Amino acid sequence: MNKIILALDVCDFKKAEKLIRETSSYVDVYKVGPMLFLRFGREVVKMIKDSGKEVFLDLKFHDIPATVKRSIESAKELGVFSLTVHSTGGEEMLKAATSVENRPRIWAVTVLTSQITVPQEVIKRAKLAKTCGIDGVISSPLEIGLIKKECGKEFNVVTPGIRLAKTDDDQKRVSTPEAAVKEGADFIVVGRPILEAVNPAEAAKSIYGSIMKD
Ligand code: C5P
């Protein structure tokens, strides 16, 4: 499976469809967040799956254990490939999440890439998630090596905060696609570098080329 996950951070169904058409040679998994899901829900998940692609449902669940468990059962019904929870929900919540049988992959957010933190905090949260049966974490590209060392190769590391050049936006802990994949990222989540490119297809192609080099 291709390592690029395109974040469909748009509010327009037709725009999402167009982005999928333009990037489908380079992307296998599309991320649907609250922006798109709150408007089009099942319809957008179906459209992505009908295009032969997978859905990463990024709603970052953080609630009492029973509610998170039932939310994950609903996501399973939708047939999504993966979803997110917040590691700060705690042990009981994380265990309730992973207790759902034949569920989608669950990735826990350690610390948002827009926040500044210390590696020890990220590792503490990644280890807790692993102990609770979570499949991997969403983390900054700067922490990939350390997480893989502490939690093992099989534990997924999915990294947003991907930038092609130095930018001055809300992402604080960033890296290039090439460096993130070299460090061992299982997936890189890319939003604005493709969405805001003059030619999104070209941008996706160029990122794909840069991570397939070795
Ligand atoms: O536009 P950009 O490339 O920054 O998009 C990154 C995407 O990854 C956004 O959709 C954002 O919600 C998501 N994300 C993140 N940091 C996390 C988890 C998800 O940036 N810890």
Image (tube, rainbow, N blue to C red):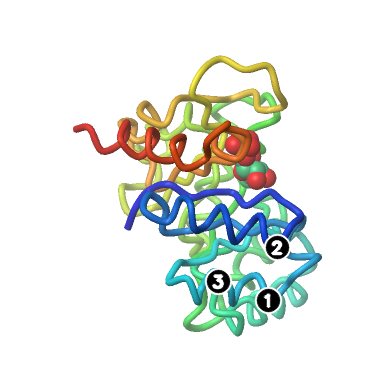
The percent coordinates of residue 92 (x first, y second) are 67, 66
In 3D space, how far apart are the residues under numbered discs 1 and 3 (Cα atoms)? 26 Å
Write the residue at 35% across / 29% down.
178
Q: Earlier in the sequence, mark 2 or mark 1?
A: 2
Q: Earlier in the sequence, mark 1 or mark 3?
A: 1
In 3D space, how far apart are the residues under numbered discs 2 and 3 (Cα atoms)? 31 Å
Quarter of the figure with the C terminus:
top left
Residue 45 versus residue 24 in the image, above or below: below
- Local packing at callout 3 (Cα closer than 10 Å; few below 14, some 14-19, many 20+) is many
Residue 111 visible here: no
Write down which quadrant ligand 1 falls in. Answer: top right
In contact (CB < 8 Å): disc 2 and disc 1: yes
Q: Earlier in the sequence, mark 2 or mark 3?
A: 2
Identity, as a three-letter code, of the amino acid under mark 3:
Thr
In 3D space, how far apart are the residues under numbered discs 2 and 1 (Cα atoms)? 9 Å
Looking at the image, how many numbered discs can be counted on the residues?
Answer: 3
Identity, as a three-letter code, of the amino acid under mark 2:
Phe
Q: Secondary structure at mark 2?
A: helix
Which circle marks residue 98 in the picture? 3
The percent coordinates of residue 177 (x first, y second) are 41, 31
In this figure, which residue is indicated by the disc labeled 2?
A: 13
The percent coordinates of residue 155 (x first, y second) are 39, 52
Q: Secondary structure at mark 3?
A: helix
Quarter of the figure with the N terminus:
bottom left
Which circle marks residue 43 in the picture? 1
